Image: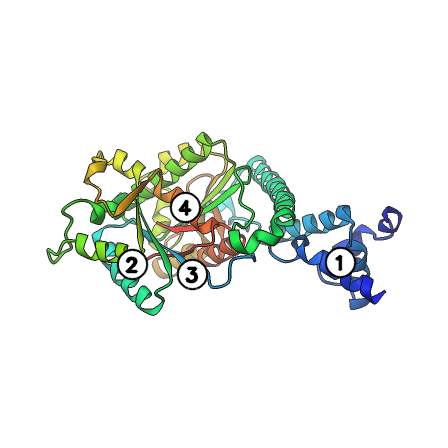
Amino acid sequence: MSNEEQKFSDEFINAFVDDQLTPEEKAQVYARLSGNEALSRQICELRKTRDLVQLAYKEPPMPARGMATLSAGRKIGLGVAAGLMLVIGGISGWFLHQSHAPQNIAVAQPGVSAEEQAKVLFHVSDGNAKHLKSVLDDVEDLMKHYRRSHQNARVEVIANGEGLSLLLAGISPYAERIQKMQKEYHGLTFVACQNTIDRYQQELGLTAKLLPGVVTIDSGVAQIMRRQHQGWAYLQV
Amino acid sequence: MRKFFLLSLMAVLPLGLIPVNAGHAAGANKVIYHVNLGNEQASDALRNISNHLAVDPTAKIVVVTHSAGIDFLLEGAEDKNGNPYSGPVAALAAKGVEFRVCKITLERRKIDPKKVIPEAKLVPSGVVEVTKLQQEGYAYLKP
């Protein structure tokens, strides 16, 4: 079987993952997948990578305009870490799924284990200062919890609407605290909604200046949907 | 050959080509109501839950509270019209609704755990509870 496996070029397998093969060619791959763990895993990983690429953060607007951006090092670090986690998650999910397949319906535990990475999304849309403090308290408590339990975690705090004020330089009452939290917890990312930023610009003539290290996403709402589809837990706070 | 092909397909299907978490039990109507904003939101939640159970009496409902959301589960709590929360909470608890209160919030706000009404159960962290339940297949509702 391993000799036959050599016949598939990387391009061919990539085309399979991207759904660009003819039905006949696809059938060849499916046939070969049977009992071929290496090939299955390769395809599984390619799919994960593809999804990751599709969902990668958009570049924030130019820093020259006063928008904050990630340093190149941190960005690459994030990407590599995220990629690794996805691959690890994918493989462990795959094995879990394999071993638990028959009981799956009864247990309804979609590949959750202590070792697996926790992924949690906080959605902030209210700009009240007292409220924003309790949001940061909640986020920090969660990060501490994962640290104590030695669990890998990716946590995103997505701000849109009035919640964007949490992440605006010169406006956020908690700029220093956010900076501290970013340094303290590497799995934590603050994300601003580009739609909201654009709306502020159009309606109020405000050019939003984001705090350092804050990334932007095209649409906060779309990101929330994507993340939930990817299995992230969601909290509106 | 055809048989081989079919067998191959069967072998492929569990390999992650379908989403790993597609296996929730059919009809598993488990729902989190997330309450963290205060009594006004809690009143909405209690009303929503009554309606929810009227439509779907088999729904498994867990109310997870933290921050200002725990207030309605403290002894003597009243809504804005002066009606105690304990009545409607006890009625829903009798129908199987679970109420959970965040310990971190109690510590942070220096509230004696004894002040939490007996229908509610303490959990180490409300936020962690919400994430765990979602991993167990609970849907998330924010009233």
The number of discs equals: 4
- Disc 2 target residue: B95
Query: Which residue is rendered at x = 46% and y = 55% of the image?
Result: A224
Image location of residue A172, percent across then percent down? 33, 42
Graded by Cα atoms within 10 Å as few (under 14), some (14 to 19) or many (20 or more), the crowding at tag 1 reads: some
Q: Which residue is mark 3?
A: B29
* Foreground: disc 3 or disc 1: 3
| First of labels 4, 1 by sequence position | 1
Which of these two is toward me, A92 or A71?
A: A92
**How far apart are the alpha carbons under marks 3 and 4?**
43 Å
Mark 4, Cα crowd under 10 Å, few <14 / some 14-19 / many 20+, is some
Indicate which label's residue lies in the foreground, 2 or 4.
Answer: 2
| Disc 1: which residue | A15
Classify mark 2: residues with Cα within 10 Å, few (<14), some (14-19) or many (20+). some
Q: Are marks 3 and 4 on the same chain?
A: no
The quarter holding residue A200 reads bottom left
The answer for how far apart the CA atoms under marks 4 and 1 are is 41 Å
Residue B81 visible from this viewpoint = yes
Q: Residue at x 10, y 55 (%)?
A: B82
Kindly state the secondary structure of the residue where label 3 is placed: loop
Q: Going 62% across and 49% down the picture, which residue do you hit?
A: A97
Q: Is residue B130 above or below residue A137?
A: below
The amino acid type of the residue labelled 3 equals Asn
